[in-house]
Amino acid sequence: MNQQQTTPTIHEVFPYLMVRDAKAAIAFYGEVFGATELFRLVEPSGRIGHVELQLGPIVLMLSEEYPEYGMAAPQGETSNGFVIHLHVNNADTLGERAVAAGATMMSPPTDQFYGERSCRIRDPFGHFWLLGHSIEKVTPQEMQRRYTEMMSG
């Protein structure tokens, strides 16, 4: 058997978020990002076990915390090592909308060396989002040159 036959193929990627208040998260993601609910699974207790939201071209999955299974929402104000990066038509406007809906602006909209204008927000549920739009096409070589220059001081 050759390598191509044994290597798994990824067909789709689904970001999956744990939150403390799924109903509020669904409303926030709908208001700010235009997410639409596809379906949800609710326990008899009312705890949301799973919901799928259409977010542009992807499906965002989320649920309430399940500490009994080691599944927890972000704690405190530090990053959890995970950021969702959305390419949008206007990062400034979307950042403003997110803040108006309760997000915290962590990094204001700024032109970046890699040809994008972007900002970073923390949503009310502790997840970080990088919102950006293209401002120029930059080759990988030019991007590396700019990055090296920036990191060299």
Image: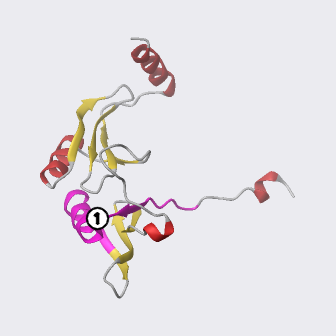
Residue 44 in picture, x, y percent from top left: 35, 88
Q: Of all residues shown, which one is farthest toward the bottom?
A: 44
The residue furthest left is: 100
Question: Left or right: where does residue 80 sit relative to residue 27?
Answer: right
Based on the displayed image, in which of its 4 quarters is residue 117 positioned?
Answer: top left
Instruction: Tell me the element at label 1.
Output: loop
Q: Amino acid at mark 1?
A: Ala
Rendered image quadrant of residue 121: top left
Q: 70 or 122: nearer the eye?
A: 70
Q: Position of residue 13 (x, y in %)?
A: 51, 59
- Which corner quadrant holds the C terminus? top left
* Residue at point 43%, 69% (across, down): 66
Query: Farthest residue toward the top?
Result: 153
Furthest residue to the right?
Answer: 1
Q: Residue at x 31, y 64 (%)?
A: 20
Placement of 45 over or under 55, stated as above or below: below
**How is the protein colored in the picture?**
secondary structure
x, y percentage for residue 120? 29, 40
Q: Which residue is mark 1?
A: 35
Q: Residue at x 30, y 69 (%)?
A: 22
Q: Characterize the local packing of mark 1: few (<14), some (14-19) or many (20 or more) Cα atoms within 10 angstroms.
A: many
Is 10 or 67 nearer to us in this picture? Answer: 67
Q: Is residue 147 above or below residue 52?
A: above
Confirm whether the magenta stretch covers residue 35: yes
- Residue 114 location (% of width, % of height): 39, 29
Residue extent of the magenta highlight:
11-37
Q: Is residue 40 magenta?
A: no
In the visual, does 6 lie left or right of 103?
A: right
Q: Nearer the viewer, residue 101 or 143?
A: 101
> Which quadrant, please, contains the N terminus?
bottom right
| Count of numbered circles in the view | 1
